[in-house]
């Protein structure tokens, strides 16, 4: 239109007729789409930054749940303009993790440790276990067993322990996808729990639960042939009670974990009363 009007000296009405454009459209002010779509761009960037593997509908549903009222056609147009509809092959790099000191906490429920194990039933079906211990007295708080233990299942175990024991100030854990999941990380943030991720390939930084895993594998997983998950759960529950209530632990002065916790609690209460 600019060429026809300025260079060819055609009238606006004649130029509009040539290119089949209405005069109202010609006189309509130009829209800066980059500025108009900036809120959509920022919202999509937030969604992609949180999880770069999400597709369009996951991003769109996340925007709607977050209170954004954008039409899905508009979001799709911006989504394509940002080239987000093209395959994204980049792998997510884990953030730099500093070495966490492995020190015995002074009190119960101060630091817990989480870790996964895996084994197979007699007929070859694989299963996993989620082991949770208290680092202060090495007490085993839970052994969750199933064929799959996603982040939602980990949260459910933590909710159950919350009712029984309360929650810790910090949790030591590795970089597994279940423990790095947004749902689990958000749940810990909501409850004020510090996550102490160990460095990749450094299981010694989670030595307390790794030592427990060795004992559990030696005395349970390698000692029996399991036909079903019910058998694994039953035998593990019996062993867990034995481990906490009766089995001596050399690092605890040859006392069982629960007995050590009770004595330490009584000793601290007595010291507090004397000082008061």
Image (cartoon, rainbow, N blue to C red):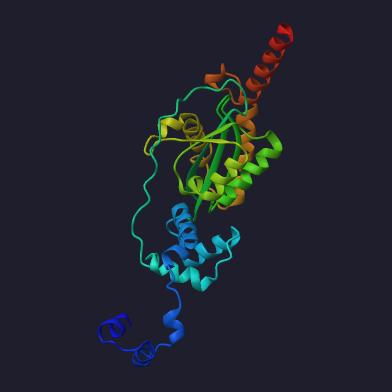
Residue 208, image x, y percentages: 49, 29
Which residue is found at the position 34% from the left and 56% from the top?
90
Q: Is residue 232 visible?
A: no
Query: On the picture, is 176 further left or further right than 240?
Result: left
User: Does 241 appear above or below 181?
Assistant: above
x, y (%) of residue 211? 48, 30
Choose between 223 and 42: the one closer to the eye. 42
Report the quarter where the C terminus lies. Answer: top right
Say which quadrant the N terminus sits in: bottom left
62 relative position to 276: left or right: left
Residue that lies at the very extreme toward the left in this rendered image: 7
Q: Tell me if residue 251 can be seen.
A: yes
The residue that appears at 58% across and 65% down in the rendered structure is: 69
Q: Position of residue 58 (x, y in %)?
A: 51, 63
Picture coordinates of residue 122, whole percent (x, y) = 50, 52
Residue situated furthest top in the rendering: 274
Q: Residue at x 59, y 57 (%)?
A: 66
Q: How many marks?
A: 0
Name which residue lies at 56% across and 46% down: 186
Q: Quadrant of residue 8?
A: bottom left
Question: In the displayed structure, would residue 148 be above or below residue 26?
Answer: above
Q: Would you identify the image quadrant in which residue 7 lies? A: bottom left
> Relative to 192, does residue 120 appear above or below in the rendering?
below
């Amino acid at each position: 239109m600019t060429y026809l009007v300025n260079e060819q000296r055609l009238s606006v009405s004649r130029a509009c007729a040539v290119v089949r454009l209405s005069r109202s459209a010609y006189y309509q002010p130009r829209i800066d789409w980059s500025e108009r779509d900036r809120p959509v761009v920022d919202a999509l960037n937030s969604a992609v930054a949180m999880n770069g593997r999400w597709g369009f509908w996951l991003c769109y549903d996340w925007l709607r749940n977050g209170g954004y009222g954008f039409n899905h056609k508009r979001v799709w147009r911006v989504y394509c303009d940002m080239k987000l509809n093209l395959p994204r092959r980049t792998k997510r790099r884990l953030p730099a993790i500093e070495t966490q000191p492995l020190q015995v906490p002074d009190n119960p429920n101060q630091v817990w440790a989480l870790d996964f194990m895996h084994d197979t039933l007699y007929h070859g079906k694989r299963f996993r276990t989620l082991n949770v211990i208290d680092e202060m007295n090495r007490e085993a708080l839970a052994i969750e067993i199933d064929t799959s233990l996603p982040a939602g299942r980990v949260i459910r175990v933590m909710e159950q322990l919350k009712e029984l024991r309360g929650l810790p100030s910090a949790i030591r854990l590795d970089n597994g996808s279940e423990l790095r999941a947004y749902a689990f990380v958000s749940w810990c943030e909501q409850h004020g729990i510090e996550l102490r991720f160990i460095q990749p390939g450094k299981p010694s930084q989670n030595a307390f639960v790794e030592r427990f895993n060795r004992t559990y594998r030696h005395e349970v997983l390698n000692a029996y042939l399991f036909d079903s998950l019910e058998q694994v759960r039953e035998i593990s529950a019996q062993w867990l009670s034995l481990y906490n209530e009766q089995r001596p632990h050399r690092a605890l002065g040859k006392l069982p974990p629960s007995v050590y916790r009770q004595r330490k609690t009584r000793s601290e209460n007595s010291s507090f009363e004397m000082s008061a």
